[in-house]
Amino acid sequence: MSEQDKNGKKEPTPEKRSSRRQFLKNSGLTVGGLVVGGALGSLFGKDTATQTTTVKEEQQAAAPATDNANRALMFFTPDQFDIANAAVERIFPADELGPGAQELLVAYFIDHQLASGWGIGAKEYTSGPYYPGEKTQGYQGRLNRQEIFAIGLEAIESHSIATFDKSFIELTEEQQDQVLTDFDDGNVEMKGVSSDFFFSLLRSTTIEGVYADPLYGGNANMEGWKMRNFPGHQMSYFNLIDQDEYEEIEPKSLSSQHNH
Amino acid sequence: MVTTLPKTDVVLIGVGWTGGILAAELSKKGYKVVGLERGKGRKLDDYLMVHDELRYSKRHEMMQDLSRETITFRNNEKMRALPMRQHGSFVIGEGVGGSGSHWSGQNFRYLPYDFQIKTLTEEKYGKNKIDPIYTIQDWGITYDELEPYYDAFEKMAGISGEENPLGGARSNPYPTGPMKVSPVLKLFKEATTNLGLHPFSVPSANLSETYTNPDGISRAACQYCGFCSRFGCEYGAKADPVVTVVPVAEKTGNFDLRTHSNVVEILHQGNKATGVRFIDTQTGEEFIQPAEVVGVTSFVLNNTRLLLLSNMGTPYDSKTGKGVIGKNYAYQNNCGETIGLFDDKQFNLYAGAGSLGMCIDDFNGDNFDHTNLNFIHGGNIALLQTGKAPIGFNPTKEETKNWGKQFKQESIKYSSRQIALDAQGAIMPHRYHYLDLDPTYKDAYGNPLLRMTFDYEEHDREMAKFIGDQTEKIVKEMGATETYTTRDQPTYDIVPYQSTHNTGGVIMGADRETSAVNNYMQMWDFENVFVPGASAFPHNSGYNPTGTLGALSYRAAEGIDKYLKNGGLLV
């Protein structure tokens, strides 16, 4: 985990992708799974999308892609990643207090988590028979979290297109919020799971990616912790616990324990 | 093929607190004890990477593998019970130490009132105080009779505390002094004192100072690191079977601990068990372990399930109210919560310990007059500073949406400025709250899952209204700039975490018609089977259960010793 220490002073950077994929997108040679109809030309040619791409490419030139080997995908397709990366930023946006979920690499965190045993419910009871049940009986669906995310991200895209005739990543922040609110309110028809269940999973996983130890790939450079003065892994508060003053402590990640 | 192993004096099903205590006490006396634990082994060094909220708190590192076994749940008999597919309302431990490894360490004694609840309630308020649908009964033991066993548990664990001004009489002070008092706890202490109440430090199994127990086990003091409940303690400061009773048992040379050994049946003939059948979960091999005495020492729910699966004792029948196995399942009525926001103060809430807290018993048990109230009992009201980790603690104003810019800003601001105060309300048993075998769903071996039928009732809602008034007064007196109080107790929902204080199912008592075990935890119907644990509680009091189940385990150890010497029913 020396990556973290090395990058400690560096500005967290937005996500970057392989130049081959960037080239393909910019040149309009691919539609991914998301683009419906003839929207291809507008998808990468306008406003924020272009700016982001420019920033990305500059940073890519400055820092080699091997800088943080965690920034690659284990589960998402690149298109799923783009939608997730846009959605998490609306759930936990950048503001004057500090970075948002994108800069904290939360979508990578979610990707990695979905690739784990948790993504397929390895330690959960998955035998049938299946009945919808009452809300008080908890989740009773057949889908695991990988499947819920795949269906949910696709639904975000199709709901965006149905409502605004645009891909989710092209929408303004207000429009993205409106799409996500429809999911949060349970108002979007989804296969196998309700949209509010999916949204609540997306939301809780986003918060996890903001604040989990950086060993999981999110909370880049502990910036999530720094915003709220969470000290992370500390050996002792024995002398602090009964003192009156509020104390700000430089955070430490678990790598400081494992590699000491 | 089933391999029959050499006979042992005592076989234990599960090695958490109850199993660990029996193992230590009986192996010290020279008995040969085999401990069968279905999870993995643990040692102190395993806890070195424990400051990880995601792994331990959110991904349930120390909890039961539900893919192999879970329970089914319904609120009432009209509903179809469905499996608890993910962890939620309660989290059951797995592996050596069990729930005793991931607990918070709050270690109370129940009140004298608890053990004679039916007699004392009727004496003071008359026979009609509580609807007979609430099946309260005396425990078959008094507080004074159980006191020496509380004392034994507290000395083993090194409980840190100060006298509860409204609690039962103590033969000895706590082995170690109370935990430190943080600024927010100081505010609570001042506020409750101003209101004429009786604050005291939460009795804590997170050691306030270095301590050596009567078995010679030395442990370090708590560092208030903030990773406690759902975590193991890397200092060994939190009393945990892994660092207390299990090494004591192992040192005797009389304790054979077998991990990855899942007991699926208790074997019996006439009024005696002959041993247990278990499966090695790593090889699939089946074994029979014959024994003079069987200790049923798993969690509450599995204790009940194993007896039902093994056809032992009469299953409870809600239609007739007869039968005992599965009867009086109860839980914790966490209620009357007041949230307080402090715009003008900041607290170091990231620091704390699982049982760092200040509490009052003024509204617990029968410490207050219930003449004009529509409920009995009450709950301990505690302000805890357990250490707030950031994934799980994102407080905002009540009306704020839980995502977006406003959520981010408020949750960051209030992460050092919010407290929550509620009561751990007692739950009275109810004729239609019980445990039995599910007709549909099976575990990894094809055996029926346990079915839980439970809901919060009118009694719990009446308590919630009353408690809400008390917590609101206290939090306002503490100087909160804004408060929100919950006076409702809606339908029980198995999804949000509430409490792992599940109780009942194999209850104790003085009468074999209405209880499963006597006051030595000995089954009335099988004299060499002992079932200590919170499964023996006829109702759940307004406190954490571990102190009491620990005391009952010391009582059971004494009972097993007597039985092995003399045989027969001990009561």
Image (cartoon, rainbow, N blue to C red):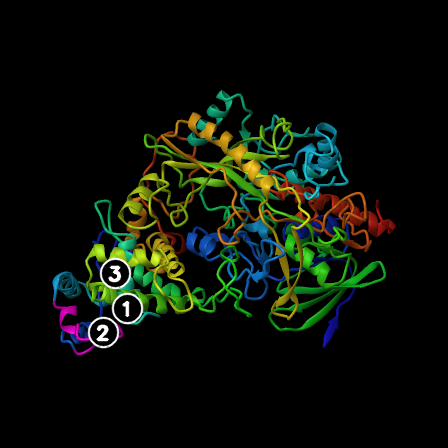
Q: Quadrant of residue B213?
A: top right
Give percent across and percent down for residue B138.
74, 39
Marks 1 and 2, how far apart at CA: 9 Å
The answer to whether B280 is drawn above or below residue B560 in the figure is: below
Please name the residue that numbered disc 1 is placed on.
A158
Q: Amino acid at mark 1?
A: Ser
Please name the residue that numbered disc 2 is placed on.
A36
Determine whether the residue tagged by mark 3 lies in a helix, strand or loop.
helix
Give percent across and percent down for residue A250.
31, 44
Q: Are marks 1 and 2 in contact (CB under 8 Å)?
A: yes
Q: Which residues are magenta?
A: A29-45
Q: Amino acid at mark 3?
A: Ala
Q: Earlier in the sequence, mark 3 or mark 2?
A: 2
Residue under the point 53% across and 48% down: B491
Position of B179 compared to A25: left or right?
A: right
Position of B30 compared to A125: left or right?
A: right
